[in-house]
Amino acid sequence: MSVMKRSGRCMCGAVSYKIEGDPVVTAQCHCEECRRLSGTGHTVGAMFRADQVIISGKLGEYVYTSANGSQVTKAFCSGCGSPIYGRNTKAPDHMTLPLGSMDNADDLEIQVVIFDRDKPHWDALPETAAVFDTQPDWKPEKV
């Protein structure tokens, strides 16, 4: 059986990574910290053992103490600011990489949703929303 190989990169391409093997878990998180750091209603990340991941390029880091008291490091491309990984002192031998930065994450499924109690009401696709397959020639009066 072959080992799954994944790759990913930041928006500008200055930081890239390679991963060998499957993630420990794939999770969607709605905690306030993830929402503020991502600027969205949630993050989706796959946690891997750190020894599965090789990163190339110049990273910046933001370190903070989480609500549960652990030290969290968020690494990002120092050029474009794209998030690359997160590490937590409660799981020091692991790192979580955002699925949106991966070149090949189509086979991954969200296994757990955490901090669902903090999920904002607007972070759901309403049945009445206009949905487009690509960027439309959108103007407010056309909706």
Image (tube, rainbow, N blue to C red):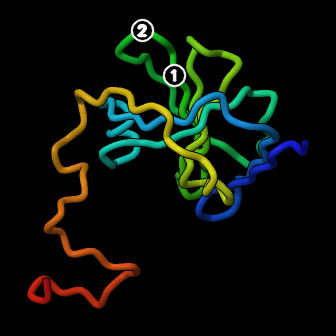
In the drawing, what numbered circle is on residue 72? 1
The correct choice, above or below, for 25 with respect to 138 in the image is: above
Residue displayed at 30% across by 45% down = 41
In the rendered structure, the answer to whether residue 126 lies left or right of residue 94 reads left
Q: Residue at x 20, y 41 (%)?
A: 120
**Residue at (75%, 48%) from the top-left corner?**
17
Q: Is residue 106 left or right of residue 41?
A: right
Q: Where residue 64 sits in the image (x, y, percent)? A: 45, 22
Q: Is residue 109 above or below residue 134?
A: above
Q: Is residue 132 above or below residue 44?
A: below
Q: Which quadrant holds the C terminus? A: bottom left
Q: Residues within 10 Å of mark 2 (few under 14, many from 20)?
A: few
Q: Position of residue 34 (x, y in %)?
A: 39, 35
Q: Amino acid at mark 2?
A: Gly
Q: Quadrant of the N terminus?
A: top right
Kind of element beneath mark 2: loop
Q: Nearer the viewer, residue 36 or 114?
A: 114
Name of the residue lying farthest toward the right: 1
Q: Nearer the viewer, residue 68 or 30?
A: 30
Q: CA distance from mark 2 to mark 1?
A: 9 Å
* Residue 29: quadrant of the picture: top left
Q: Which mark is residue 58?
A: none
Kind of residue at badge 1: Val
Counting from the top left corner in percent of width and height, residue 84 is at 60, 44
What residue did someone put label 2 on?
69
Image-based side of 7 in relation to 46, left or right: right
Q: Residue at x 54, y 45 (%)?
A: 109
Q: Position of residue 124 (x, y in %)?
A: 24, 52
Indicate the secondary structure of the residue bearing disc 1. Answer: strand
Q: Residue 11: name its quadrant.
A: bottom right
Q: Residues within 10 Å of mark 1 (few under 14, many from 20)?
A: some
